[in-house]
Image: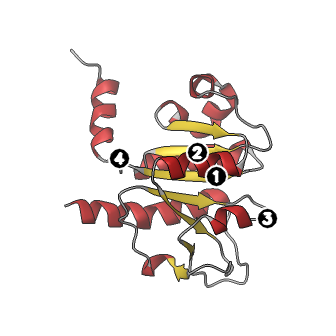
C-alpha cells in the first residue's frame, strides 16, 4: 500500500510539463534558487538547471536534497524537483544542445534577438529551456546568442525588473498554461 505522500507525488507527476527546463544563470543567493524551486514544483516544470559560478550548491542532486539551508527556504521542494548543477554557461548550452532543447531567455531589456512580450510568445516546443539571468547582470550574451528569442514581462511600474522568484513564477505560469492547453 502506498503512503499518502507517495500518492500525492504520483498525482503531481501527472501535471509536470515534460521537457520543460528552467535555467538559472549564476544566481547570487540560495534564496533565489529556493524560490525558483518552489515555483517549479508548484507550477509543474520538469527540472532546474543552475549555472553555479558562485558555488551555492553542492555538485550533485542527492546532496542538494539533503542540504539544510536549501530545504528550509524551499520547504523541501528540492526533494521533488530534479536539479542539475553546471560550472559555466557553455557547459549547460552544450548539454541542452546535445539533448535538442530550444532555449529562450528572459530580460526586461531588448537584447539584440527577436524580442517578444511574454503573452505574445508560443511555448509549445517539444523540448524547451527557459533561461533567467542573475539579479545584477541579467542573462549573459553567451546565453542570448544561443537562444531563439528573448521574452519580456510587460510591466507598468517605474522599475524595469522583478526579483528572480517573482519573474520565474510569472513566466512559468504562462508557459505551463500554454503547454498544458497544447497537450490536450
Image coordinates of residue 173 in percent, x first then y, are 44, 63
Residue indicated by mark 4: 16
Whether residue 139 is visible to the viewer of this picture, yes or no, is no
Taking the spot 65% from the left edge, 58% from the top edge, the residue there is 164
Residue indicated by mark 1: 24
Q: Quick check: 132 above or below 53?
A: below
Give the spatial CA distance, label 1 vs label 3.
12 Å
Whether residue 84 is visible to the viewer of this picture, yes or no, is yes
The residue carrying pointer 2 sits among few (fewer than 14), some (14 to 19) or many (20 or more) residues within 10 Å by Cα, namely: many
Mark 3: secondary structure: loop
Give the spatial CA distance, label 1 vs label 2.
6 Å
Q: Are marks 3 and 2 in contact (CB under 8 Å)?
A: no
Give the spatial CA distance, label 4 vs label 3.
30 Å
Q: Quadrant of the C terminus?
A: bottom left
Give the spatial CA distance, label 1 vs label 4.
19 Å
Residue indicated by mark 3: 137
Tell me if 153 is positioned left or right of 160 in this view: left
Mark 2: secondary structure: strand
Residue indicated by mark 2: 49
Looking at this view, is 65 or 8 the one in front?
65
Mark 3 vs 2, N-terminal side: 2
Q: Are marks 1 and 2 in contact (CB under 8 Å)?
A: yes
Image coordinates of residue 128 in percent, x first then y, are 45, 58
Taking the spot 26% from the left edge, 65% from the top edge, the residue there is 181
Mark 2 vs 4, N-terminal side: 4
Mark 1 vs 2, N-terminal side: 1
Taking the spot 61% from the left edge, 85% from the top edge, the residue there is 156
Image coordinates of residue 33 in percent, x first then y, are 65, 45
Quarter of the image holding residue 123?
bottom left
Mark 1: secondary structure: strand
Amino acid at each position: 500500500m502506498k503512503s499518502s505522500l507517495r500518492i500525492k507525488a504520483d498525482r503531481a507527476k501527472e501535471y509536470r510539463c515534460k521537457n520543460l527546463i528552467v535555467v538559472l544563470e549564476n544566481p547570487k543567493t540560495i534564496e533565489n534558487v529556493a524560490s525558483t524551486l518552489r515555483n517549479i514544483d508548484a507550477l509543474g516544470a520538469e527540472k532546474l538547471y543552475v549555472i553555479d559560478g558562485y558555488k551555492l550548491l553542492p555538485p550533485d542532486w542527492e546532496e542538494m536534497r539533503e542540504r539544510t539551508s536549501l530545504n528550509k527556504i524551499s520547504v523541501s521542494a528540492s526533494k521533488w524537483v530534479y536539479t542539475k548543477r553546471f560550472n559555466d554557461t557553455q557547459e549547460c548550452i552544450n548539454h541542452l544542445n546535445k539533448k535538442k532543447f530550444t532555449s529562450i531567455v528572459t530580460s526586461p531589456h531588448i537584447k539584440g534577438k527577436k524580442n517578444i512580450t511574454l503573452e505574445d510568445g508560443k511555448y509549445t516546443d517539444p523540448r524547451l529551456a527557459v533561461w533567467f539571468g542573475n539579479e545584477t547582470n541579467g542573462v549573459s550574451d553567451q546565453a542570448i546568442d544561443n537562444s531563439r528569442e528573448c521574452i519580456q514581462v510587460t510591466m507598468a511600474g517605474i522599475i524595469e525588473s522583478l526579483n528572480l522568484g517573482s519573474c520565474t513564477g510569472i513566466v512559468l505560469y504562462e508557459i505551463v498554461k500554454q503547454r498544458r492547453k497544447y497537450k490536450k
